[in-house]
Image (cartoon, rainbow, N blue to C red):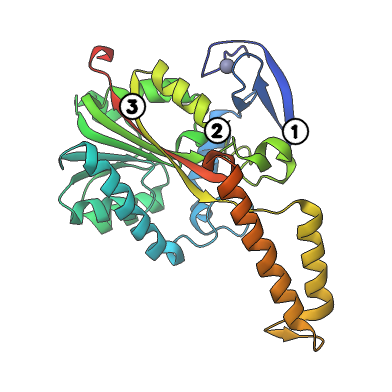
């Protein structure tokens, strides 16, 4: 199957990483990373409609979605505060809304909410939580000619096989000058770039596109969105591998506060803290936040002329 890079349109790709039988390639022109060839639509449909996705023990999905609820609620409030800087409260569509926690928090703040969710069980939960109709694809909303003031794509774009086509399709649901807010893992962080085999977000077929701030903003601009702000989220502070290994060995030998294997257990805690503080200080002083952010959050406005 022929395919062009979703970001820049080039058809020259170089191999980047083999993972679980899938091939991740890098665009030779713009460095966008994506799974090529992409899995077929039946594989993807089966992945997301399996109820185990939101409580799976395996490598995919969320280990226990419900247990993380308090965290999601706080995160939703933080994200809405950013959104409300740019747009007055009105209509909001959350695409890939899962069990509707973000929508519920938005509703409590006065937003009129709608959601799209492909996983049937999560969609039912979101309907129960918000009292709103949740649809399984954008098609019914497009047919009805609906438009929204805000569209949010939290941890969504990395899952779709063609992010450019998806953004263009969803853009038709956003009013001119409306706000697009999205988050995605940050493939520009050092671990992803230098030791990709260790980066847990390279997980096809669940994740298919891997954005850096640069490739994401370029794609958004190509789809008619103007950047308002980029936030670096969930920093992943990490010492060089040999230091991390040394610390792990010290714990096995000496034990820690909960498991005092020798009278010197406290040496392990001191060493661990010293390493952590040094690593954080190093990151803050010498690296850009985008070099260690686990994720990217982007807020962008739909250009009027892209209508
Ligand atoms: Zn490209």
Between circles 2 and 1, the one closer to the viewer is: 1
Circle 1 crowding by C-alpha within 10 Å: few under 14, some 14–19, many from 20: some
Q: Quadrant of the N terminus?
A: top right
Q: CA distance from mark 1 to mark 3?
A: 31 Å
The reply to whether the residue tagged 1 has its Cβ within 8 angstroms of ligand 1 is no
According to the picture, the residue beneath numbered tag 1 turns out to be 18
Q: Residue at x 29, y 42 (%)?
A: 115
Sequence-wise, the earlier of marks 1 and 3 is 1
Residue 153 is situated, as x and y percent measured from the top left of the image, at 38, 38
Sequence-wise, the earlier of marks 3 and 2 is 2
According to the picture, the residue beneath numbered tag 3 turns out to be 170
Q: Say above or below: 277 vs 50.
A: below
According to the picture, the residue beneath numbered tag 2 turns out to be 42
Residue 101 sits in quarter: bottom left
Q: Residue at x 68, y 83 (%)?
A: 257
Q: Quadrant of the C terminus?
A: top left
Residue 46 is situated, as x and y percent measured from the top left of the image, at 54, 41
Q: Where ligand 1 lies, by image quadrant?
A: top right
Left or right: 154, with 242 as reference point? left
Left or right: 43, with 114 as reference point? right
Q: Residue at x 41, y 62 (%)?
A: 71
Camera-side residue of 203 and 244: 244
Which residue extends farthest bottom?
Answer: 263
Sequence-wise, the earlier of marks 2 and 1 is 1
Residue 284 is situated, as x and y percent measured from the top left of the image, at 56, 49
Camera-side residue of 244 and 56: 244
């Amino acid at each position: 199957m022929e395919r062009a890079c979703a970001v820049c349109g080039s058809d020259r790709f170089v191999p980047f990483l083999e993972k679980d039988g899938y091939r991740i390639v890098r665009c030779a022109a713009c460095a966008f990373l994506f799974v090529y060839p992409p899995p077929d639509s039946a594989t993807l449909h089966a992945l997301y409609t399996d109820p185990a996705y939101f409580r799976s023990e395996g490598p995919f999905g969320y280990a226990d979605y419900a247990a993380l609820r308090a965290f999601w609620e706080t995160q939703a409030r933080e994200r809405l505060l950013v959104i409300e800087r740019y747009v007055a409260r009105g209509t909001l569509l959350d695409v890939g809304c899962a069990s509707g926690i973000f929508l519920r928090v938005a509703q409590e703040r006065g937003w009129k909410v709608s959601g799209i969710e492909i996983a049937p069980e999560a969609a039912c939960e979101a309907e129960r939580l918000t009292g709103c109709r949740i649809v399984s694809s954008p098609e019914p909303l497009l047919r009805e000619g609906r438009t929204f003031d805000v569209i949010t794509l939290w941890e969504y774009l990395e899952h779709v096989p063609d992010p450019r086509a998806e953004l263009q399709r969803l853009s038709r649901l956003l009013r001119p000058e409306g706000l697009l807010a999205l988050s995605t893992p940050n493939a520009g962080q050092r671990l992803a770039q230098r030791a990709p085999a260790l980066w847990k977000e390279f997980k096809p077929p669940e994740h298919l596109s891997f954005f850096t701030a640069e490739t994401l903003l370029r794609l958004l601009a190509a789809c008619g969105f103007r950047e308002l702000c980029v936030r670096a989220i969930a920093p992943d502070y990490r010492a060089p591998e040999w230091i991390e290994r040394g610390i792990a060995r010290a714990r096995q030998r000496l034990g820690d506060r909960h498991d005092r294997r020798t009278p010197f257990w406290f040496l392990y805690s001191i060493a661990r803290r010293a390493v952590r503080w040094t690593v954080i200080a190093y990151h803050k002083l010498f690296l850009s936040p985008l070099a260690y952010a686990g994720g990217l959050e982007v807020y962008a406005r739909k250009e009027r002329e892209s209508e």
